[in-house]
Image (cartoon, rainbow, N blue to C red):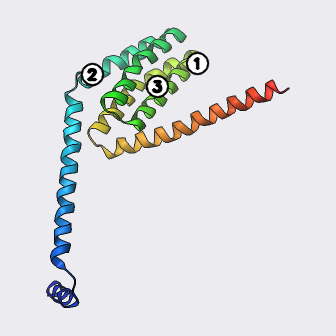
Amino acid sequence: MSNQRRRETGERLGFDSQNDQQKQLEAIEKERKRREEKERISQRIRESKSYRILISGAIGFDILDAFLGIFEFFGDALSFVVGLGYVYISAFVVRHLRLSLAVLFVLLTDLLIGFIPVIGTAFDIVFPASYICRNMIQGVVDHDKKQIRLVNIISISGFFIVAGMFALVYWLISYFTNR
C-alpha cells in the first residue's frame, strides 16, 4: 500500500519513475558485464601454463625452500631466485601491482630472515614464503576478499617499511659523508 502511494505521489509531483527504473536496469546490466569480464580474466589466468605450474608445484617449492635453507647464505639466495617466479606470475600473468609488491616483500623478508644462521632455517619451515605467495596469488585470481585484504596490508606496509629503510640508509650516508 505504501509503495503504491509513493508511486502515485511521485507521479503527481513529476518524478519520472520510468527513468529511475531504466537507470537501475542499466546499472544492473553494467555490473553484470563487469563481473563477466572479471571472471573471463580469471579464467584466462587459470588456463595459463605458468599459473598451473605454480599451483601444482607449490608443495615442491615449499620443500625446496626449507631444504635450501640448510645451506645458509647460498641456499637462501637460491630460494629467493626460485621465488622470483611468483613475482613474474603476479606481475605479468595476473598483472596486479599490489600483489607483485606483496609477493616481493614476502620473498625479501624470507631472504633476510633466512640469512640468520639457525633461526632462518627454522623460520623457513614455519613460515614457507612460497606457500604464502601462492595463496595470495590464488586468492586474487579467485577474488577471495580475505586474501585480497592480506595482499593490500602486506603491500602497503611493505612499501612503507622499504621507504623507511631507504630513508634511513640515505640519512646514514649523508651523516657519515658530512663528518
Q: Amino acid at mark 1?
A: Ile
**Helix, strand or loop at mark 2:** helix
Q: Name, please, the residue furthest toward the right.
A: 179
User: Of discs 3 and 2, which sits in the foreground?
Assistant: 2
Residue beneath disc 2: 50
In depth, the one of 125 and 88 nearer the eye is 88
Q: Quadrant of the N terminus?
A: bottom left
Q: Amino acid at mark 3?
A: Leu
Reply above or below: 161 against 31.
above
Residue at x 41% of width, y 16% of height: 65
Residue 179 picture location, percent across and down: 85, 26
Question: Are there few (<14), some (14-19), or many (20+) residues within 10 Å of tag 2?
Answer: some
Residue at x 18% of width, y 51% of height: 33
**Helix, strand or loop at mark 1:** loop
Residue beneath disc 1: 116
Reply above or below: 179 against 73.
below
Q: Amino acid at mark 2?
A: Ser
Quadrant assignment, res 143 = top left
The Cα atoms of the two marked residues, 3 and 2, are separated by 18 Å
State which tag comes first along the sequence, 1 or 3: 3
Quadrant assignment, res 8 = bottom left
Q: Are marks 1 and 3 in contact (CB under 8 Å)?
A: no
The Cα atoms of the two marked residues, 1 and 3, are separated by 15 Å
In the displayed structure image, the side of residue 88 where residue 17 appears, left or right: left
Residue at x 29% of width, y 23% of height: 54
Residue 50 picture location, percent across and down: 27, 22
Residue 107's disc is 3
In the displayed structure image, the side of residue 179 where residue 70 appears, left or right: left
The Cα atoms of the two marked residues, 2 and 1, are separated by 32 Å
Q: Are marks 3 and 2 in contact (CB under 8 Å)?
A: no
